[in-house]
């Protein structure tokens, strides 16, 4: 399967593809788009403590530029994957729209991870994610 270059690069970074790392990529891209360069940007990722949901953290790191090494990203326990970005007094929160986590968990399949990752990469942002500013 031919993947968009960004997804192929994410696959190399993370070691494989999956829905949650792809969702994290989408979330991190929004943070980078809204705030620009990672300098001064901080991300707080909320997730369950174990994979596969925890993989959202790698997707956010990959696309936002916030990394554990730079110390500008943190992981907190949560039942739903979400990320809060803060920079210079501005803040946005990005989360899955209601019902998506249950669907992901019900349909996730190691045998179909490429197709599923591509689906979550291409679905319109407004259909998948809620963004709250302020």
Image (cartoon, grey):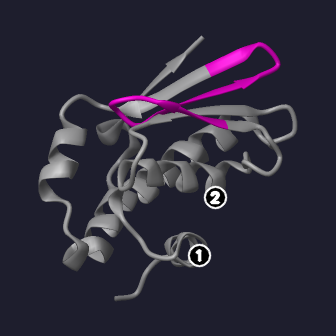
Number of numbered discs on residues: 2
- Residue drawn at x 32%, y 53% is 123
Q: Position of residue 128 (x, y in %)?
A: 32, 41
Closest to the observer: 89 or 13?
13
Q: Could you tell me what secondary structure mostly forms the magenta stretch? A: strand
Alpha carbon distance from label 1 to label 2: 9 Å
- Residue drawn at x 70%, y 24% is 86
Give the vertical position of 110 relative to 103 (above or below).
Answer: below
- Residue drawn at x 32%, y 76% is 114
- Residue drawn at x 51%, y 43% is 27
Location of the N terminus (image quadrant): bottom left
* In the image: residue 134, left or right of residue 129: right
Q: Where is residue 106 in the image (x, y as percent from the top left)?
A: 12, 51
Q: Are marks 1 and 2 in contact (CB under 8 Å)?
A: yes
* In the image: residue 119, left or right of residue 7: left
Q: Name the residue under label 2.
A: 62
Closest to the observer: 126 or 82?
82
Q: Mark 1 points at which residue?
A: 9
Q: Is residue 30 magenta?
A: no
Kind of element beneath mark 1? helix
Q: Name the quadrant containing residue 9.
A: bottom right
Q: What stretch is highlighted in magenta?
A: 74-91
Kind of element beneath mark 2? helix
Q: Position of residue 38 (x, y in %)?
A: 80, 42
- Comes first in the chain, label 1 or label 2: 1
């Amino acid at each position: 399967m031919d993947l968009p270059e960004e997804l192929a690069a994410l696959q190399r970074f993370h070691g494989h593809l999956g829905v949650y790392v792809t969702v994290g990529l989408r979330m991190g891209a929004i943070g980078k788009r809204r705030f620009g360069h990672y300098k001064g940007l901080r991300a707080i990722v909320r997730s369950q403590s174990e994979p596969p949901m925890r993989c959202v953290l790698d997707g956010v790191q990959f696309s936002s530029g916030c990394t554990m090494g730079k110390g500008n990203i943190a992981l907190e326990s949560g039942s739903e994957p979400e990320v809060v970005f803060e920079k210079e007094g501005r803040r946005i929160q990005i989360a899955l729209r209601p019902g998506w986590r249950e669907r992901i968990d019900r349909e996730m399949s190691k045998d179909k991870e490429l197709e599923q990752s591509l689906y979550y990469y291409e679905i319109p942002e407004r259909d998948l994610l809620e963004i709250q500013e302020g």
